[in-house]
Image (tube, rainbow, N blue to C red):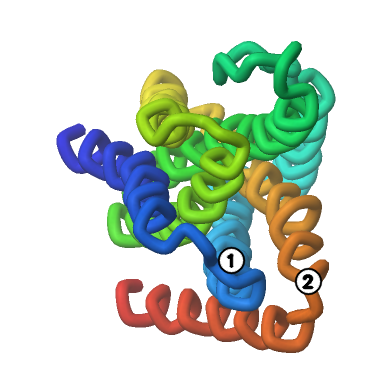
Amino acid sequence: MNIVFLTALGVGGASVIGAVFGFIFKKISHKFSDIVLSFAAGVMLAAAVIGLILPSLDYGGRFSVAVTVIGVFCGAVCVNLIDKLVPHLHRLTGVDKEHHPEKQEQLNKVLLFVIAIAIHNLPEGIAAGVGFGTGNTAEALTIAGGIALQNIPEGMVIIGPMLATGMSHGRAFLIAVVTGVIEVLGTLLGFFAVSVSTAILPFALAFAGGTMLYVISDEMIPETHSHGSERGATYSLLVGFCVMLVFDVLLG
C-alpha cells in the first residue's frame, strides 16, 4: 500500500513539478513542447497496450477478448462524455469581467484547456492505480512513470497562458496543484477498485487502457501536430514507444 500511495504522489506531483518549470521557463517553444509531449505519448501508448490491454486479455479467462474490447470502448466513451460535461468555471480566477472583457474571454479559453487536462488526469490516475492490480509492481511503476512523464510538460504549458491573462502566481500554482491532486485521487481509486474485487480486474485494465488511448489520439497527437513540428513529433513518439518497450523487457 505504501508504494501505491507514493506512486500516487509521484504521478500527481509530476504536474506540480511541471508547473514549477513553467514559472521558470515562461516562454516554452511549441517545437520543444511538441517533442516532449510526443515522447510522453509514445511512452503512454506502449504502457496502455503492454501494461494494461494485453494483461486484460491474460486475466479475462474464457471471454477475455470480449471483456477487453468492451472495456477499451467503455474507457474511451467515459472520457468522451466527461469532455462534453465539463462546466465553464469562469469565476475561478477573480478577473474583473466588466473592466477586462478581452482578458476574461482569453481566460475562459485557458481555463477550459486546464480543465480538460484536469479531467483527463482522473482516468490517467485510475490507469496508474489499476496497474498494481496485476501484482506486477515493476510493470505498474512503468505505467505510472509514463503517465508522470506526460504530466510534466502538461504542467509546464498551463502556467504561461494563465499568467498572461493577469492571474496571480499563487492562484496559477494552486490550480496546477489541484490538477495533480485529482490524479492522486484517481490512482488511489483505481487501486482500491481492483483490490475490492479481483473479478473486475480484466475490465478495469481494459477500461484504463481505453482512457489512455483516447487521450493520446484525441488530445496529445493532434496537439503535437498542429504547430509545424509533425515530423519531429512523430519520431519522438516512436522513440518514446521504443524506450517503453526496452524498459518492459529489462524489468520483465
Q: Residue at x 55, y 34 (%)?
A: 166
Q: Residue 201: x and y, percent?
A: 52, 35
The answer to which image quadrant residue 88 occupies is top right
Say which mark, if any, is on residue 227: 2
x, y percentage for residue 147?
Answer: 47, 54
State the residue in front, 168 or 32.
168
- Position in image of residue 233 (x %, y %): 69, 79
* Count of numbered tags: 2
Q: Earlier in the sequence, mark 2 or mark 1?
A: 1
Residue holding disc 1: 37
Q: Residue at x 57, y 76 (%)?
A: 32
Badge 2 marks a residue whose secondary structure is loop
Give the CA separation, mark 2 to mark 1: 13 Å
Q: Is residue 46 visible?
A: no
- The amino acid pointed to by label 2 is His
Q: Is residue 97 above or below residue 53?
A: above
**Looking at the rendering, which quadrant does residue 129 occupy?**
top left
Instruction: Rate crowding at label 2 as few (under 14), some (14 to 19) or many (20 or more) other CA atoms within 10 Å.
Output: few
